[in-house]
Image (cartoon, helix red, strand yellow):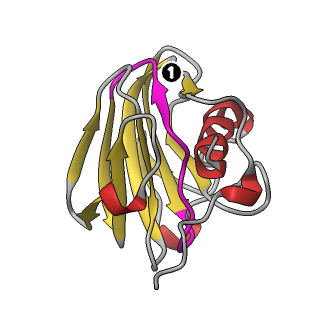
Amino acid sequence: MNPVKAIQSLIVIASAACLPVAAAQTDHGFIYLPPEEVPFKSPFGVGPEQAILYGDPSKPGVYVVRVRFPAGFHSNPHFHSQDRHATVIKGTWWNGTGEELDFNKAKPIKAGSYVLHPAGGIHWDGAGDEETIVQITGIGPVETTPVRGPPDPSKSHWPSPK
């Protein structure tokens, strides 16, 4: 399985262990979180990082998370148990569908774009040659299932351009 996919699966699983946004400023129930204070964490210490901005993906209810992909990192083919709505915040997010990871078949999704990953839809995604940040909203609980076993973080990079 693709290391990025594995990383994403572990990110979703590990998200329950991530602390809610503690650095956010609150005022009468409003949450204000500047981009430099988003508490990104990686379960592996390298590769994609996630920050839970609101809710908890492992529990019932609405959640909002951000995923930051370092340049070249991607997920392996996987699917989610619930719909996930993504907005590209920074960079270009490369998306593909199906069980075979092939960067040459990936669609470049630029900043400001919206993507729906429907429940059960097999896909893979990641960053090209620049850091990419994606905000994901959904209704929990949600599970991420890799198509081919556990992830291998050592294989989570796109091939180098020729």
Q: Secondary structure at mark 1?
A: loop
Residue visible at 55% across and 55% down in the picture: 24
Q: Label the magenta part by its dominant secondary structure.
A: loop
Total marks placed:
1
Q: Is residue 23 magenta?
A: no
Q: Position of residue 23 (x, y in %)?
A: 62, 57
* Identity, as a three-letter code, of the amino acid under mark 1: Val
Picture quadrant where residue 91 is located? bottom left
Q: Is residue 161 above or below residue 121?
A: below
Q: Name the residue at the front extreme.
A: 162
- Res 32 → quadrant: bottom left
Residue 35, x across and y down, in percent: 47, 69
Rendered image quadrant of residue 89? bottom left
2 relative to 38, above or below: above
**Residue occupying image coordinates x 33% and y 25%:** 83
Horizontal side, residue 71 vs residue 122: left or right: right
Magenta-drawn segment: 69-83
- Residue that sits furthest to the right in the current view: 45
Q: In the visual, does 123 lie left or right of 1?
A: left
Q: Which of these two is toward me, 148 or 40?
A: 148
Which of 40/49 is in front?
49
Q: Which residue is mark 1?
A: 142
Residue ID at (76%, 48%): 43
Residue that appears at 24% across and 67% down:
110
Tell which residue pokes out farthest to the bottom in this image.
162
Q: Is residue 16 above or below residue 4?
A: above
